[in-house]
Image: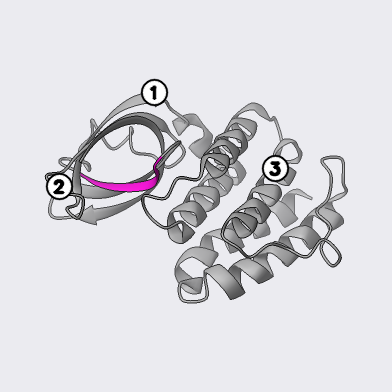
Amino acid sequence: MQLRTTAIVCSLRQHGEHGVIARLLTPENGLVAGYVRGGRSRRIRPVLLPGNIVQAEFRARTEDQLAGLTVELNRSRAGLYDEPLAAAAIEWACALTAAILPESHGYPRIYGALDGVLNAIEAAPSARGWVVALLRYEALLLRELGFGLDPETVTLPEQEAEWPAILAGFGETGHFLGRDLLADRRNDVMAARERLIERLKRAA
């Protein structure tokens, strides 16, 4: 297997003394994992921040083998990690994506939506500029994976909605995410969401 593509860094896991296994979201191949030799080094660590856009090259002898991965930075969002609310949003959006998508299944709409959410976080001066986009991204993931929200019982707010409606929307999507997609990983992944929601409540 050989694949060279633009990708969004979603999650990292230490592997061995110096390497990491990175899971990247690609436009056509969906979530793809690869081993980055020296991924914990000073040179590569800033490249592999969740939310960054990279040029990725995966190489494996067989389809079943974990690919070796090399990355080059296309777009860094490292500066956003100095802002606690933006950092929490990026952490949650990327962790959620990595946790629930099956590997090597293409989801072009999800790739485009995640890229749009990250761009909105980067561009907006406050959470109000991106918070509804993030909420709608959660709903899109549920729909794409077959757990669509019932429009008769759940109404997602518009961009100009007040904070109570926005937080209520997160309550609805959080219920379905925890029940249907993250039931076996609730403590691991939903903790990132809880940190985000608490920061949003303080910003409201």
Question: Which one is nearer the viewer's eye here, 57 or 198?
Answer: 57
Residue under label 2: 18
What span is in magenta?
29-35
Check if mark 1's residue and mark 2's residue have beta carbons within 8 Å: no
Residue shown at the point (45%, 68%) measured from the top left:
188
Check if mark 3's residue and mark 1's residue have beta carbons within 8 Å: no
Where is residue 87? Give x, y as percent.
53, 43
Residue under label 1: 74
The circle on residue 127 is none
Residue shown at the point (51%, 56%) measured from the top left:
96
Q: Amino acid at mark 3?
A: Ala
Label 1 – label 2 distance at C-alpha:
23 Å
Q: Amino acid at mark 1?
A: Asn
Residue under label 3: 133
Of the numbered discs 3 and 2, the one sitting upstream in the chain is 2
Where is residue 180? Give x, y as percent.
58, 72
Question: Which one is nearer the viewer's eye here, 51 or 142?
Answer: 142
